[in-house]
Amino acid sequence: MNRNVRDYNDSSVGNKKNKLINLAKMSLLSLALLLPLAGCGSDASSVGASKEGNKDSDIQKLEIKLSHVASDNTPKGLAALKFKEMVEEKSAGKIKVKVFPSGQLYGDNDEIEAVQAGNVQIIIPAAAKLSGFEETFEIFDLPFMFKNEEHLRAFEDGEAGQQLLATLDNHGMKGLAFWPNGFKHITNNKVAINEPKDLKSLKIRTHGGQIINEFYDALGASSTKIAFNETYQALQLGTIDGQENSIVNIETQKYGEVQNHLTIAGHARSEYAVVTNKQWWDGLNKETQALLTDAMKAATEEGRKQVEELETGSMEKIKNEGKIKIVELSDKDKEKFKQATKPIFDKWAKKMNQEILTKAIEAGN
């Protein structure tokens, strides 16, 4: 009897024990199922917070070196400073842009190699300096190619301009934009230039390039490539007789101090290409690229605005100083120069990308 009672009691105790264990297991299972749900709620909250702060949190911390050869008070210099301002402001200081003007970091002769090597992130060379990679970059040097600013901008902002910049992708570089510097005009210290024959025997400094060299050959002059920041001294020493440049560069570089004559010719365009190292650019995330692209657009517009304003101001200064005699070619005068250099236009136009060239011409219609 006692044994049966004991066996019964042992069994009851065992059953109770098993129930408690099962209940505990069920509780643990329920808790395990609830934890992921709680985690999902937490993750959703943090994702939302991350998206709200996406612009700041996803911008990379960078230092960008931007090198160019013009002074800060030129359209290129002011556009570069605008780029710096916009980038640093929009990135809340996460991206620092160090601008090196006037060839302080790299000059005309070594800036392209420097950006290809990744020693500097952004350079702004004359577009024609890139003709060794794609001949169509000399389109700006084709005699009287672009009628006016509107024609030029329609080309640069359109499909053809972007297509031209994209040709740099195969050479370790990426073209970001075209920046303006104005139409080119001629100064010299020997003779007033009214017609093609007046250029005979003059030695003219240019930024280099086969088209522009042949342009002067066709007019009986010779041309030589000299770095921009060395041009004043070359003029002063008489190493060269003259040079070609925009009105703003002519005024800000004080060429009137060492030149006697200025001819407003507008025979070619002094245009820049903003270029970066492709590998560096491709290593940036999309948010950082977007910020830099937007800042570049704002800087480009600033450069265009400055060209209009500064060219007017520089021309007034040159006239008021009275140090240099000015000849403004009429349309009839320009036609003489067009005819004299037409073989140069035709020869080099055939060597350029015909699709880009055709679109460039059509942009002016």
Image: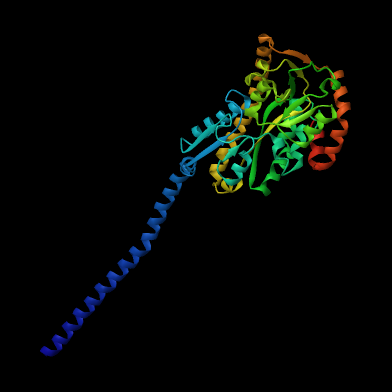
Q: Is residue 362 above or below residue 12?
A: above
What residue is rendered at 16% in x and 82% in y?
9
User: What percent of the width, then of the height, locates residue 359?
Assistant: 80, 37
* Colour mapping used in the image: rainbow
Picture quadrant of residue 76 = top right
- Nearer the observer, 365 or 226: 226
Instruction: Please indicate whether residue 38 sits to the left or right of residue 279 in the image.
Output: left
Picture quadrant of residue 205 = top right
Residue 365 seen in the current view: no
What residue is rendered at 49% in x and 32% in y?
89
User: What percent of the width, then of the height, locates residue 11?
Assistant: 20, 83
- Nearer the observer, 238 or 231: 238
Instruction: Please indicate whether residue 166 sits to the left or right of residue 82 in the image.
Output: right
- Nearer the observer, 222 or 72: 222
Q: Is residue 183 above or below residue 353?
A: above
Q: Which quarter of the figure is the C terminus placed in?
A: top right
- Nearer the observer, 346 or 361: 346
User: What percent of the width, then of the height, locates residue 167?
Assistant: 71, 45
User: What percent of the width, then of the height, locates residue 45?
Assistant: 42, 48
Residue 217 seen in the current view: yes
